Image: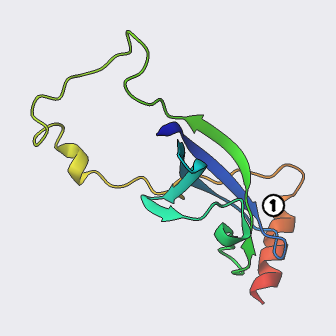
Amino acid sequence: MITEMALERVEFTCGRCWHDWSIDYDVQQYSDEDGAWEYFSRDGIPVPSPYTPAGASPCPVCGRHWVGRLLARRLIPAAPGAVGTPREKVTDAAHHRPERRGAPLLHSTAHTPPEQPGVGVELRERASSAAAD
């Protein structure tokens, strides 16, 4: 049984070249007879937790893998919701909102990465240039 769904923005900072980047993950927490579990996915593809070495993201500049840290999260309410929650009956599932099928996917890296306070742009650019050499 799904107990929680969320979108988590995970920030990564490369310890070699100091490049910052972030990735959005869909997270489902669920429980079954074997215990409580978390399921991570990116763009609909199952992936290991970005908070573990197995799911560490490679730096887009130098390729080293780094474990992420939670930057922000948004809970996604599960249906059916509280009494009085707005809802719309789907009467023709095959033809309901057909524009959804052709809409471009919102990719997990399609957002502007956050600026890291305390680390100047010049320092990061110098570190990125040094790593590329």
Where does label 1 land, which residue? Answer: 121
User: Residue at 42% across / 52% down in the picture?
Assistant: 106
Q: Quadrant of the C terminus?
A: bottom right
- The x, y position of residue 19, in whole percent, is 76, 68
Q: What colouring does the structure picture have?
A: rainbow
Q: Residue furthest right?
A: 118
Horizontally, residue 123 falls left or right of residue 31, namely right
- Residue 97: x %, y % from top left: 18, 38
Q: Residue furthest top?
A: 84
In percent of width and height, residue 73 lies at 63, 40
Q: Residue furthest bottom?
A: 133
Drawn side of residue 37 relative to residue 96, left or right? right
- Image height of 33 relative to 107, above or below: above
Q: How many marks?
A: 1
Judge by depth and name the residue closer to the eye, 49 or 119: 49
Residue, x 44% and y 59% (percent of image)? 43
Q: Nearer the viewer, residue 40 or 128?
A: 40
| Quadrant of residue 67 within the rendered picture | bottom right
Q: Secondary structure at mark 1?
A: helix
| Amino acid on which the number 1 mark rests in the picture | Val
- 112 and 37: which is toward the camera: 37
Q: Nearer the viewer, residue 35 or 24?
A: 35
